[in-house]
C-alpha cells in the first residue's frame, strides 16, 4: 500500500509539473536539447527539440528561427541530419531550429493537428466534429500563444521565422500562410497533401486573397516527380497554376520538382537547397 501511495504521489507531482508548463530538458548533442511541453490549446504534450547555432554562446546576436514538424519521424530526422551535414562542411546554419513531434499514435495525432477544419457557411467558424481530425487551428494557437512565446523568451530570436513541414506538415504550411497575420516569413511545404478534406485549403486561400494588404511572405513548394499515386504531384501542380494566376504582389513563390524522387527521398534534397537560402 505504501509503495502504491508513493507511486500515486509521484504521478501527481509529475502531472502538476507538466501542466504548470515547467520544462525538463535533456541534451541530445552539444547543440541540441530536448524537452516535453504541454499545450493548453491542444490539450496534449509535444516533443520539442531545440538546436542552437554554433556561435550562440559566444555571441549576443539574435537569430532567425526555423520551426520544423515531425521532429521524431523521418522528415524531422532528415532536418537534423541536414544541420549536422552543414556543420561538417563548415557551413553551419546561422539559425535556431525548433522541432515539434508527437507522442503516441502519430498517424492519428498528425491528422488531428495538421489537417484543415471545415468552414461553416458564415465563413468565420472553423469546426470539426472528429476529435482526432481537422483541428489545425488549435495547433496554430499552440504555436502562436504558447510555443513561440516560450522559445522567444528563452532564446535570442528575430521575428522573421520559418516553417518546414512535410506531407500533412506541408499542408499546414499553407494554412499558416493563408492567415491575415502569418506567424512565419518563410513557408517550406514539402510534398504537401493538398487534396485532404476535398481540397478545402483553397477556401482558406480565398480568404487570403480577399485581404487588402497581405504581408510579405515566401513560399517554397517542393515535390518528387514520382509522387503520382499519392496525388501529391497533381495537387502541387494545381496549386502552382493557381498561385501563378493569383500573382500575389507580396508573395514570393518558388516551385521545384525533384526528378526521379519520391515522397520521402525528395526531403533531404529540398532541405539542402532551401535551408541556407532562407537564413543567409
Image (cartoon, rainbow, N blue to C red):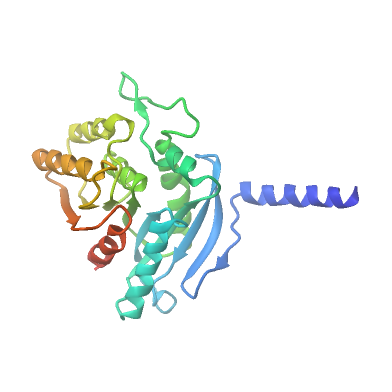
Residue 6 image point, x, y percent: 83, 52
Up/down of 221 relative to 128, above or below: below
In the rendered image, the residue lying farthest to the right is: 1
Q: Which quadrant holds the C terminus?
A: bottom left
Residue at the image point whose x is 55% and y is 43% from the top: 44
Compare residues 210 and 165 and report the one nearer the observer.
Answer: 165
Residue 204 image point, x, y percent: 27, 33
Compare residues 246 and 65 and report the one nearer the observer.
Answer: 246
Up/down of 207 relative to 60, above or below: above
Compare residues 91 and 198 and report the one nearer the observer.
Answer: 198
Residue at the image point whose x is 33% and y is 31% from the top: 197
Q: Quadrant of residue 264?
A: bottom left
Residue 257 image point, x, y percent: 18, 54
Residue at the image point whose x is 33% and y is 53% from the top: 163
Q: Exactly how many numbered labels are in the figure?
A: 0
Residue 190 image point, x, y percent: 28, 52
Q: Is residue 73 left or right of residue 181?
A: right
Q: Is residue 23 left or right of residue 231?
A: right
Residue at the image point whose x is 48% and y is 61% from the top: 49
- Residue 214 visible somewhere in the drawing: no
Q: Quadrant of residue 161?
A: bottom left
- Residue 90 visible somewhere in the drawing: yes
Up/down of 101 relative to 197, above or below: below
Q: Is residue 143 left or right of residue 218?
A: right
Up/down of 177 relative to 131, above or below: below
Amino acid at each position: 500500500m505504501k509503495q502504491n501511495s508513493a507511486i500515486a504521489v509521484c504521478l501527481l507531482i509529475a502531472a502538476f509539473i507538466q501542466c504548470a508548463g515547467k520544462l525538463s530538458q535533456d541534451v541530445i548533442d552539444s547543440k541540441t536539447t530536448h524537452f516535453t511541453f504541454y499545450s493548453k490549446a491542444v490539450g496534449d504534450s509535444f516533443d520539442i527539440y531545440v538546436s542552437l547555432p554554433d556561435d550562440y554562446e559566444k555571441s549576443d546576436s539574435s537569430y532567425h528561427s526555423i520551426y520544423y514538424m515531425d521532429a521524431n519521424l523521418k522528415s524531422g530526422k532528415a532536418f537534423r541530419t541536414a544541420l549536422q551535414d552543414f556543420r561538417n562542411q563548415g557551413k553551419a546554419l546561422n539559425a535556431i531550429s525548433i522541432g515539434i513531434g508527437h507522442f503516441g499514435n502519430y498517424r492519428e495525432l498528425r491528422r488531428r493537428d495538421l489537417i484543415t477544419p471545415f468552414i461553416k457557411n458564415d465563413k468565420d467558424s472553423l469546426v470539426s466534429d472528429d476529435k482526432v481530425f481537422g483541428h489545425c487551428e488549435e495547433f496554430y494557437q499552440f504555436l502562436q500563444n504558447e510555443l513561440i512565446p516560450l522559445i522567444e523568451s528563452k532564446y535570442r530570436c528575430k521575428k522573421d521565422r520559418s516553417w518546414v513541414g512535410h506531407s500533412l506538415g506541408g499542408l499546414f504550411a499553407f494554412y499558416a500562410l493563408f492567415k491575415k497575420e502569418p506567424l512565419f516569413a518563410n513557408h517550406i511545404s514539402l510534398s504537401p497533401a493538398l487534396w485532404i478534406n476535398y481540397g478545402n485549403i483553397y477556401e482558406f486561400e480565398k480568404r487570403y486573397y480577399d485581404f487588402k494588404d497581405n504581408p510579405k511572405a515566401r513560399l517554397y513548394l517542393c515535390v518528387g516527380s514520382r509522387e503520382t499515386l499519392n496525388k501529391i504531384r497533381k495537387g502541387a501542380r494545381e496549386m502552382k497554376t493557381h498561385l501563378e494566376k493569383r500573382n500575389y504582389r507580396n508573395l514570393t513563390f518558388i516551385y521545384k520538382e525533384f526528378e526521379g524522387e519520391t515522397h520521402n527521398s525528395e526531403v533531404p534534397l529540398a532541405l539542402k537547397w532551401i535551408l541556407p537560402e532562407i537564413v543567409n
